[in-house]
Each structure stands twice: as C-alpha cells, then as structure tokens.
Image (cartoon, rainbow, N blue to C red):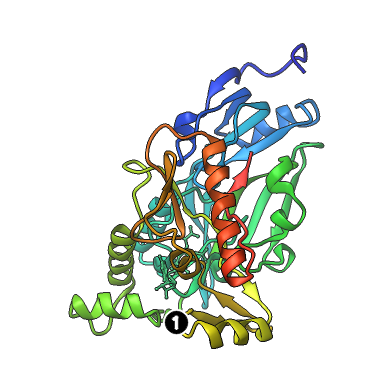
C-alpha cells in the first residue's frame, strides 16, 4: 500500500488520541477527512484492504495503531427535502454532529428526535448501531440513507425496511460493514411525523418533567429534561473520557430471566416483543461490585455502572483488561454474557 498512488487529501501517520472519546492512544497509517462524497469515489477501488469509517469516535475502542486507511466522515449539510400531509423529510450529511442536528430540527419546528438528545456521535453513525434512549430508537424516525460502495465508487440507497434494524443493530452491523469500511454512509434522511406525541413513559423522564412542573411538555421541554438527566448521569467525554454505555443490555430467553428474577428480585427486566427479556447491564455490573471501581487507569463510572471511563493515560489494553474482568464477574455471578458496544479497532 505504501507505494500506491493516493489522492492528495490522504494524510500519513495521523494521531488518533483526540479523535476517540475514550482518549485512547494510537495512530492511523493513512487518514482522510471526507467532507464531500466525491472524495470517496476517488478513493474507491484503490484504497487499501484495511479501511475503517469513523464518525464522532464516540463508539470506538482503539487497541493501538491502525495500519489501514481511516476515513473520518465530515460531510455537512442539513435540509428539508420533502413534506407531505403526514411527515417532514429531513436530510443531513453523515458528518453532522448528532445533538446539533437534533436541536436544529426542533428549532425548525419539526419534533420527533427530542428523546435522543445529547447522544454523542455523528448523524452517519446513528443508524449503524440504531442509537436509542428514553423510549425511542432512531430506526423509528429513519427514512433512508445513501452510502458509497468503496469497491466501485457507486452510490447505494437503503430504505428503512432494507436496514433490518434491531436493538443497537442494523444491516451495517450484520454485514460487518462497520468493521471493514466496505460502505461509507454519506447522508441520512429522517421522517418526522406531523402527528407528534410526547414519549415520556420512562420514570426518569416523568420525574424530571414533574420536578420542572411541566404537565404537557412540548418537544423542546422533553429535549431539555432529557439533556439534564444525561448530564447528571453520564460523564462528558471532554471532562472524563468515555464511550457512553460500554456494554449492550443483554437479551435473554424468558426462562433464564424468570430464574434470575426469582433469585434477584431487584434486577430490572424489560420484556421484548419476541418474548425474550432485556436485562439492565448497569444493575448486573453494579451488583457484581464494579460500580465506581477502577482497574488501573480505567473504571466503571460511579453514577452509571454501564459507562467505562478513562481516568487518565489509559491504553486500549487497560480497557480490554477491565472489560474482561467485568464480563468474567457478571458471568460468574449471574451466568449472563455481556457484549461490548464499542467497535474494537
Ligand atoms: N442501573 C443500576 N445501576 C447502574 C446503572 C443502571 O442498577 O449503575 C439500573 C437502573 O436503576 C435502571 C436500569 O439499570 O433500573 C436502567 O438504567 P438506565 O435507565 O440508566 O439505562 P441503561 O439501560 O443503563 C440504556 C442505554 C443508554 C440510554 C439509556 C436511557 C443501552 C446499552 N444503553 O442505558 O444509551 O441513554 O438506556 O434510555 O441500551 C448508550 O448506548 O451509549 C447509552 C447511553
């Protein structure tokens, strides 16, 4: 690869420490900041075998140096692209900051994304892991996306049906495209229904609105309430590096959930449409003794045990050591396997 002819915008030996919210050290052999889709077409076919698409770096576990090409998606732009009697259709470039985009839609008078306030990361990353919080997943507001096929340079379009969304899951993850960078998402279109209703069934949200004496909240009030809850519970990566929830909430069959609940009545359980049950990983981690506990320079956060924090100077190996220790203890005590949420690079 070293001798291959690459476009001038590809840089060599680039520091990644400031480009991942866990602030882990590492360098990319090749790095390209992509601010327009045609840059991808220029790279298609001739870029190296190892390639990775980076959004906001908020869901990344950097284990060391990366010897491939890192594509940092920085495509901007946001606009209303259509409207019918039922919905607004709003498109954003993959590099837009997620939270700024959500706030902008609210400013325009198009509600629907307010429960996803303050989730770190970019617009392009949102559908890949189907981000979700406080009773809504982005799949419920997703309309379509465009992606560049990095082998041919062709633009492909995917609609909601094709993306096969699940809990923190989509076709991009199922196919491993989030790992091999075969497809790079360039823009996403959302469908924001005009028949808006507040989603406030989460106890935390209800309590926050009550504390603010808000009875019939509008979308902006829900956004503000959720932003306040998140600020209280989740550390700001700029102050204390982290990658949000470090593990998925495990989904187990109903017999296993019944057994666990019989022994541990306090364990939160969320029944799923397919009959299985989602369990609260934060509770399992807390009750296996890891809440607020460190291993070397990393630890599980004292206010939300599901969040792994870098207290300063950690490497990818430190994170992996803590990840394995937590997985081991939860498995030993509860017989449940925890799957990490961040992508390991
Ligand atoms: N819990 C504990 N101890 C803890 C943390 C949580 O017992 O240290 C219990 C809580 O008491 C509660 C339950 O676990 O009964 C769930 O906790 P919480 O409402 O904080 O949500 P979560 O399941 O831990 C998920 C998402 C978050 C999202 C929140 C709010 C996943 C992996 N995480 O967390 O998403 O903000 O719900 O909807 O699904 C993210 O993915 O990065 C993320 C922050």
Quadrant assignment, res 272: bottom right
Q: Is residue 73 left or right of residue 215?
A: right
* Residue at mark 1: 266
Question: At 62% from the left edge and 64% from the top edge, which residue is drawn?
Answer: 331
Asked whether, in this view, residue 271 is left or right of residue 107, the answer is: right
> Looking at the image, which residue is at 44% across and 40% down?
296
On the question of residue 183 being in view, the answer is no
Which of 115 and 345 lies nearest the eye of the viewer?
345
At 27% across and 63% down in the image, what residue appears?
228
Give SS at disc 1.
loop
Q: Quadrant of ligand 1?
A: bottom left
Identified at 74% across, 58% down, the residue is: 174
Which residue in the rendered view is the most extreme toward the top?
A: 3
> From what the image shows, is residue 17 above or below residue 243?
above
Judged from this view, the residue extending furthest toward the front is: 332
Q: Position of residue 164 (x, y in %)?
A: 71, 66
Nearest the eye: 245 or 188: 245
- Mark 1 within 8 Å of ligand 1, using the beta carbon: yes
Instruction: Locate residue 111: give its quadrant.
Output: bottom left
- Which sits in the foreground, 262 or 340? 262
């Amino acid at each position: 690869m070293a001798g291959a002819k690459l476009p001038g915008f590809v840089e060599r030996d680039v520091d990644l420490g400031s480009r991942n919210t866990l602030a882990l050290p590492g360098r990319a052999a090749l790095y390209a900041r992509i601010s327009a889709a045609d840059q991808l077409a220029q790279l298609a076919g001739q870029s190296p075998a190892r390639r990775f698409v980076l959004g906001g770096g908020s869901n990344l576990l950097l284990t060391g140096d990366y010897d491939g090409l890192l594509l940092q998606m920085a495509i901007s732009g946001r606009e209303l692209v259509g409207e019918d009697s039922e919905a607004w259709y709003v498109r954003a470039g993959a590099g837009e900051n997620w939270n700024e985009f959500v706030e902008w839609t609210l400013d325009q008078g198009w509600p629907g994304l307010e429960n996803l306030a303050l989730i770190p990361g970019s617009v392009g990353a949102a559908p890949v892991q189907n981000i979700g919080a406080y009773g809504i997943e982005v799949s419920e507001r997703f309309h379509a996306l465009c992606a560049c096929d990095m082998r041919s340079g062709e633009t492909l379009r995917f609609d909601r049906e094709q993306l096969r969304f699940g809990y923190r899951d989509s076709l991009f993850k199922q196919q491993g495209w989030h790992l091999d960078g075969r497809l790079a998402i360039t823009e996403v279109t959302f469908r924001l229904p005009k028949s808006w209703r507040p989603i406030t069934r989460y106890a935390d949200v209800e309590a926050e609105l009550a504390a603010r004496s808000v009875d019939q909240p509008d979308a902006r009030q829900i956004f503000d309430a959720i932003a306040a809850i998140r600020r209280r519970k989740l550390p700001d990566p700029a102050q204390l590096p982290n990658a949000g929830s470090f593990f998925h909430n495990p989904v187990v069959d109903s017999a296993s959930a019944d057994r666990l609940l019989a022994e541990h009545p306090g364990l939160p359980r969320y029944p799923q449409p397919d009959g299985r049950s989602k369990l609260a990983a934060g509770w399992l981690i807390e009750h296996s003794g890891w809440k607020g506990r460190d291993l070397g320079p990393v630890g599980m956060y004292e206010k939300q045990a599901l969040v792994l924090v870098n207290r300063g100077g950690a490497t990818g190996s430190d994170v992996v050591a803590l990840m394995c220790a937590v997985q081991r203890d939860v498995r030993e005590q509860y017989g449940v396997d925890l799957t990490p949420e961040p992508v390991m690079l």
